[in-house]
Amino acid sequence: MERWIQAGRVLVDGRIAMLGQRVTETENIKVDGQELAPRKMTPPRALLMNKRVGTIVSAAPADNLASVFDELPVLAGGRWISVGRLDVNTSGLLLFVNDGLLAHRLMHPSTGIDREYAVRVEGKLEDAGMEQLKSGVTIDGEIGRFSDIRYYNGHGSNHWYHVVLMEGRNREVRLLFASQGVKVTRLKRVRFGPVVLPSSLRRGQLMEIGPDDVRRLCDLMGVKYVKSGPDKTKKLNVGNSVLIPYPGLAAPTSHRN
């Protein structure tokens, strides 16, 4: 496609297209003088998975490791995009959407979407250590920090914390705790922005996020929401809302006057 654009073979509303040019469903697009049929807009969909430990977030095959993409339903058009990743030893909330712009904005640091993890560690942090993890420590030449950290519960050598990150770099949670001399023995993502992991969703299980929740996520991210017409696509189990109050998030439709 880029080679065709560079060669001047693509016209948008009668003008030669430029690389990176944004188009919507309203422009007239021609390739080698032949008009393309209007693209049918696909309603955005979103899935929520409670990822198991031992699975990878990659469509590429790996030796002796199952991919989360193997669990996803087949789309008639388009593809599922994972919103961020979790490493093979991390479980919990994983989002998939069929809209590239929505996925990009949910993941991009500039949108300020945070992530919350439940963390079990060997040992217990002192108050000074917790403050240090919020103020920042240097990891591989970069400053890492939790925007929030709370002690949850524990006994003996095992203790649970809930931590919040503004962006999740590879192994960041584990490395931050290691900087304070404690080892992470279990890591589970429980929230991604306003999306929370339902306690009823078992490990490895999928659910479809309801259309009202998807619309609210699109509005939050400034992505156009296309209403679906009669939809014959087989949907997964759609449960109750998985969104919590969050800055900039609209109220559910049923709660509006």
Image (cartoon, rainbow, N blue to C red):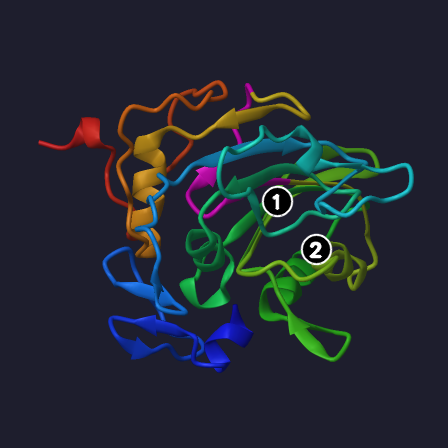
Residue at the right extreme? 63
Q: CA distance from mark 1 to mark 2?
A: 9 Å
Give the percent coordinates (x, y) of residue 96: 54, 41
198 above or below 161? above
Residue 85's x, y, as percent? 65, 50
At horizontal 44% and vertical 59% (from top left) the residue drawn is: 105
Q: Quadrant of residue 32?
A: bottom left
Q: In the figure, is residue 93 to the left or right of 30?
A: right
Asked if one can make out residue 95 in the rendered structure from this viewpoint, the answer is yes
Residue highlighted by disc 1:
117
Label disc, if present, on residue 173 of the rendered structure: 2
Residue 126 horizontal/vertical position (percent): 71, 55
Does the magenta run of residues contain 206?
A: no
Magenta stretch: residue 190 in it?
A: yes
Name the amino acid, label 1.
Answer: Tyr
Residue at image position (43%, 24%) is 233
Give the extent of the magenta segment: 189-200
Q: Are the residues flagged by discs 1 and 2 in contact, CB closer than 8 Å?
A: yes
Please state if 68 lies on the left or on the right of 111 as rendered.
right
- 117 above or below 253? below
Q: Amino acid at mark 2?
A: Val
Between 108 and 5, the one lying in front of the other is 5
**Is residue 19 shown above or below 106?**
below
- Label 2: element kind: helix
Residue 246 in view: no
